[in-house]
Image (tube, rainbow, N blue to C red):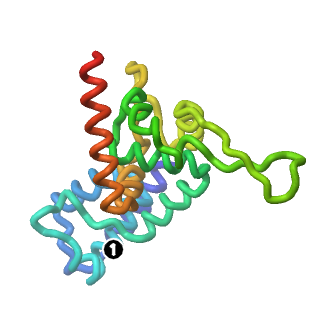
Amino acid sequence: MFNNYVQRWKQELLTLPKSFPLSAEVIAAVFQRTEGHPFFMTEVVRLLSTEQGAASRDISQPSRPVLPPTVRSVIEQRLQTVSPPCRRLLTVTAVIGREFRLQVLEAVTDQDERLRTASTPLGGNGPGEESKTKHSVLEVLDEALKAWLVVPVPHNLGRYNFTHALIQETLYEGIATIERLSLHRRIGEALEGHGKRT
């Protein structure tokens, strides 16, 4: 099946306009940015081959091809399948980086009410009534693992990473600047505190 995707991607390359500068450097940049994911590669190349994509492409920085809306849409659809606390956990994690330590994540999210609680209906207590339920970071992280959005780093207990860099990037770019700065500050404090304890 993977070979079918590769063949389709090769066919896609053959349909590009002759004016599109498909250098080895551009191909390598697309492959690196998409981590070889056939759908992502195809969509990035399609966008780059258009006037809009060519205009948005920074020739001086070929390692950062622009991401088309179709790729972001696929990632967003995957992120919509998880609960609000899980989405919040992944958002905070995206600021930490592609790879993260559980201890740092727990320290950063310790006071994060949007992650630590979620509204859940109270059974049999009347319509519209709800309670606040505490969620541990491990419980929420387990949901992200089951959704295959993050995976454990092999042979490194307590370390995880996003299954694809573009998942982390999509989450990161969706954070408002003020919140992003606040999260960076909290992460810095958590890393500093964690370093002092070890």
Give the answer, above or below, for where 80 lies relative to 141: below
Lateral position of residue 56 relative to residue 137, left or right: left
Lateral position of residue 15 relative to residue 129, left or right: left
Residue 153 makes an appearance in the image:
no
Residue 172 percent across, percent down from the top left = 36, 55
Which residue is at a point 21% across and 71% down the rendered structure image?
Answer: 57
Quarter holding the C terminus is: top left
Task: Indicate the amino acid at tag 1.
Answer: Leu
| Residue wearing tag 1 | 47
Residue 5 percent across, percent down from the top left = 46, 56
Residue 8 percent across, percent down from the top left = 43, 62
Residue 59 percent across, percent down from the top left = 13, 69
Which residue is at a point 22% across and 60% down the rendered structure image?
Answer: 64
Q: Residues within 10 Å of mark 1 (few under 14, many from 20)?
A: many
The front one of 30 and 145 is: 145
Which residue is at a point 28% across and 76% down the rendered structure image?
Answer: 53
